[in-house]
Structure formats: structure tokens, C-alpha cells
Image (cartoon, helix red, strand yellow):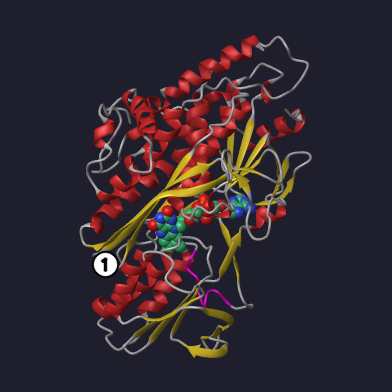
Amino acid sequence: MKVHNKLFLTGYSLSLCLALVGCGGGSSSTTVEDTNTSIATILPLSYTADAGRLLGSQCAQCHGTNGVSVNSWDSIAGENDLADEIFDDEPIMTAQAHGYTAEEITLIGNWLKTLSKTED
Amino acid sequence: MKKVNSNSRRDFMKFLGLGSLATVVPTVSSAETIPHVVVVGGGFAGATCAKYLKMWGGSSIDVTVIEANSTYVSPILSNLVLNGQKTTSDLSFTYGSYSSKYGINMVHSTVNAVDKTNQTLTLANGNTVNYDKLVLAPGIDFMKTNDYDISKVPHAWKAGEQTNLLKAQIDAMNDGDTFTMTIPAAPYRCPPGPYERACVVADYLKNTKGHTNSKVVVLDANAKIIVEEETFGAKFSEYGVEYKPSTTVTNVDDTSKTVTYIEAGSSKTLASTVLNVIPNQKAASVIFTAGVNSGNWAPINPLSYESVLASGIYVIGDSQATGQPKAGHIGNSEAKVCADAILRTLSGTALYASPKTNSACYSPTSATEASWLTGVFKYDADTQTMVASNTAAGASSTANYPKMFNWSGNLFADTFA
Ligand SMILES: Cc1cc2nc3c(=O)[nH]c(=O)nc-3n(C[C@H](O)[C@H](O)[C@H](O)COP(=O)(O)OP(=O)(O)OC[C@H]3O[C@@H](n4cnc5c(N)ncnc54)[C@H](O)[C@@H]3O)c2cc1C
């Protein structure tokens, strides 16, 4: 199980940058050193849950996957001042912004800061 | 966690002929132990869920989407096909680059049977597919009052051929002809959608076609305009739309093009050149096949979208029974909460305790104007339901019209690209 956990950790960190590389299991060439071949149970994933990313993924419907807009609406990847920015602009944005607590906006903002502006 | 039937899984991989799966763990006998999540339906909810499962779960998870059609036509913006501002091909999406970009196994067939005990699905193409977790995102079905031909009386509430049929009928109208549409009882797909359609068609007939003697009649099963009442009410007055609330359709005749309905206790029959009956709705059939419905819809836990009736089966999008609107934007939103919840569950992590979802609809009210409606939904731990924490509407304006395409552009890309 140790080996598996390590493998899946790698899988996960790959997934973090997948927006950059266009990811997916399809291109993976990982080989597994398996020592426990007798049972075919589902392996536990190693998944680092991230509340900021989960909440922030809800911005993508209007601002693009991982904050990268495909049109003239703002990209928010790399946004440094979400707490201010989220309340300005469009009435539809303001209406949305009021649906989130200050803590949630901080979580989302911290996640957006980790995203590269140029990612595609 | 359940054991996986390794033979079937191997067979499944063989039938898919997927090199991609094979390369994950080619040499090891426990290759099949990577969790396999199967998503049924590649619409706004299903396509988003599969994408985010792979984006966040990476190569530690196998994801298969089973979708009946190789091309998806978005119902969102499809009223703009009726007035010629868009075509159905503008609103069409295929899954080739989407599935290879994220490493999703794409199967085009219909799921006919769900075996919850053995965790297998039977497809129309004869194959069986095993799953560890199953996500059902199949959209809606219609409850017609009687048997009639939908090529003569189209609903155009699933987009594609139906949309083009209705457009052709509208385009064949002469000045003085009548367009009649019926609005289903809530809940139905896209609350503002029917009112939006009445506006778009009325504007098109009057201002584009110059049919100033034509009439648009709306029979609404609901007691009043259920959303954006001010906006749509004002437009109905401007266009002279004849609006009849609290009307229950009882029969549709595709030969005489008549609709029979009950209004204030008495039965009436109305003939119309074009008849656009949008029937009452329920979850799509696979929800009933899987036995995860209670009444017409599928009750779920909003922290995960897992069925309250069957563990390991999740329901997102229009089929689910929360009070959230049945709409594509929020279907995409639910899908992300569900994807995260599945990954948390597979990794033994607690579910996120206070998920939020959001909804947005831009409604065209003519060929140059649109209004909008938006809302944030939050989990209420006391009632264990999603409640609207913030809703707002924007009046119809020409400024909103181009913004509608910015919104839909990013929504479409976040779902299908
Ligand atoms: C005119 C109109 C305007 C709209 N405007 C908006 C708007 O402005 N904003 C908004 O948010 N929403 C809008 N909507 C609503 C939106 O289109 C739907 O709510 C959305 O499509 C629902 O997504 P879904 O994934 O649940 O279902 P669908 O999009 O219907 O996808 C379900 C998919 O599952 C497949 N499927 C079903 N059963 C099976 C099976 N057994 N096996 C295999 N595949 C199966 C189907 O082929 C389909 O592709 C509008 C709808 C209409 C009609």
C-alpha cells in the first residue's frame, strides 16, 4: 500500500499542473512496482482536498477553467486582490460576490494566487 | 470498499481497446484496482464532472463517460436558433479533443440497465461496463398528456433536430398566423427559458418578419411568471403576448394542431398554426431504471450528490431533486462538488461541509436584448438542503446581449473543452 500511495501522490501532483500540460491518464507512462498482487480491492487515492480550489472552481463557469477566460471577460488566474476585485465590476458579479463570506473569498483568493496567468 | 470483479474490468478495458488505460499499469496484476468512475450523460453536468474528476484525480482514477450521442447540442442559447441569431451547429460540441485532453474514456451508447449489486451497466451496444462509483447525469424526460407526434408538435426543449423543426415551422408562418406555446408546471428545465422563448419568437415575428397581425399565445401551467416577472411581464405587454396563467394542458392533437386545456375549471380547445407544447418533466429514464428516484426526481445528499437511496451512485444536473434550478450553469457547478466528493470518499477524506453552487441564466428577450438571473446556493446544515443565499436579476438591455456570449463562451469551455 505504501507503494501505491506514493504512486497516487505523484498522480495527484501531476494533476495540479495538468491545466498546463493538458494532462490526463492517457499520457501517463507510470509503471507500478506491485508487491501485493493477491487482492483486487480499490486502492485508496491520495487526494489533497483543497477548499479554496473547490470554491474557486465555481468561478470557472464565467471566468474559465482554472481562471483562464476564453473571451474578453476577465481571466482571474493569478489574481492578487480578489477581496477588492470581486465586488467591483458588473452587477452580476457583485450579486455573486455577496453570496460568499470573507473567509471563503480569502480561500478562493489564496488558490487563485497559485494559478499562473499564462496557463492555458 | 467493494471488491472489483477483475475479469470484467479487464474485459471492459479490452472492449474499449484503450491503449491509454493499458499504459497506466501494464505489467501488474492489480492494474484493475484503480478506481473506475463511470459517468452516464455527457451534458453540462456529466461532461463537467468527468473533466474535473480527471483534472483533480489525475492518473489515480479511471473515468468513463457513456453518452448516447456523439454530438451534444446545447439547449442554452437554443432559443436564438429560432430567430436566426445562432444555428444548432454553433451550439454543438463533440467529445474527441475533450476526452483525449483529460484522459477520459468516451463510449457512445445508451445505458439500458443498472445492476447495483454487481455494479455493472448494460449498454444498448450489448457491452457491459463495471463501475466502482456511478454518476448519473442524464437530464430530463417528458410526460406528454397523450400520444402525439413531436415532429408535428415539437417541444424543442432538448436541442438539436427539435430546435430546427420548430424554427422551420415558425419560418413558414404567414402574417396573421398564431404561435402557441405551453409552459410546464415547475419544476422543469430552465425556469426563465419558456418566457424567454415567448419573447424571442414574438419579437422575431413582429420585428423581423413584419407579421404585425400574428399572435403569440402562452398557456402557463404555473399561477404566474415564475422568474423575472417584471422583465418578462413588461416584454409580454410590449409584444402583445397573450398570457394565460394557471392553465392545465389535457390533450394535444397533432393533426388539427389543437391543444385542449383547463382554465378556471372549464375545458377549452385552441387551434394554432404552430404549436410548441413543452410537456411536464421528470428525471431521465435511467434514474428510474437504477431505482434512485423518489417520485419524479432523484433525492441526493447535497454534500456529495450521492443518492440517498443507493450508496456509490451519484446524481447531478436536471435529474436531481434538490431545490436548485434545473439549469446547465448550476449543473456544471454541482458536478464539481460531486467530483470533489467522490475523490474525497475514495481517499477516505471527509466531505467538504459547506459547499456552494451558483446559477446564472442570460435570457435573450429579442435579437438585441437580454436579461439575467443569478443566484448563489449554500448548504444549510440544519435542513441538509441547498438554499438560495443570494439571488439577483438584471433587466433586459442591449448592453447585456453581448455579455450573454461571454458568459456562455466560458461556460461551454469549462464544460466541453
Ligand atoms: C431554451 C433553453 C434555454 C436554456 N438556457 C439556460 C441558461 O441560460 N442557463 C442555464 O444554466 N441553463 C439553461 N438551460 C437549461 C440547460 O440546458 C439544462 O438544464 C442542462 O442541459 C441540463 O444539463 P444535464 O447535464 O443535467 O442534462 P443534459 O444537458 O440533457 O445532458 C444529459 C445527457 O445524457 C445523455 N443520456 C441520457 N440518458 C442516457 C443513457 N441512458 N445513456 C447514455 N446517455 C444518456 C443525453 O444524451 C444527454 O446528452 C436552457 C434550456 C433550454 C431548453
Instruction: Identify the residue position indicated by label 1 in the image.
Output: B367
Residue drawn at x 28%, y 32% as measured from the top left: A83
Q: Which residues are magenta?
A: B149-157
Residue drawn at x 45%, y 27% as measured from the top left: A23
Q: Nearer the viewer, residue B378 or B111?
A: B378
With A59 as the anchor, is A72 left or right in this view?
Answer: left
- Above or below residue B117? Residue A109 is above
With B179 as the anchor, is B17 left or right in this view?
Answer: right
Quadrant where the N terminus of chain B is found in the figure: top right
Beta carbon at label 1 within 8 Å of ligand 1: no
**Chain ID at mark 1:** B
Q: Judge whether residue B253 is colored magenta.
A: no
The image quadrant of residue A82 is top left
Q: Position of residue A1 (x, y in %)?
A: 67, 12
For mark 1, does the 10 Å Cα neighbourhood hold few (<14), some (14 to 19), or many (20 or more) residues? Answer: some
Quadrant where the C terminus of chain B is found in the figure: top left
Residue drawn at x 51%, y 31% as measured from the top left: B54
Q: Main secondary structure of the magenta part?
A: loop
With B298 as the anchor, is A116 left or right in this view?
Answer: left
Q: Nearer the viewer, residue A83 or B64?
A: A83
Mark 1: amino acid = Ala
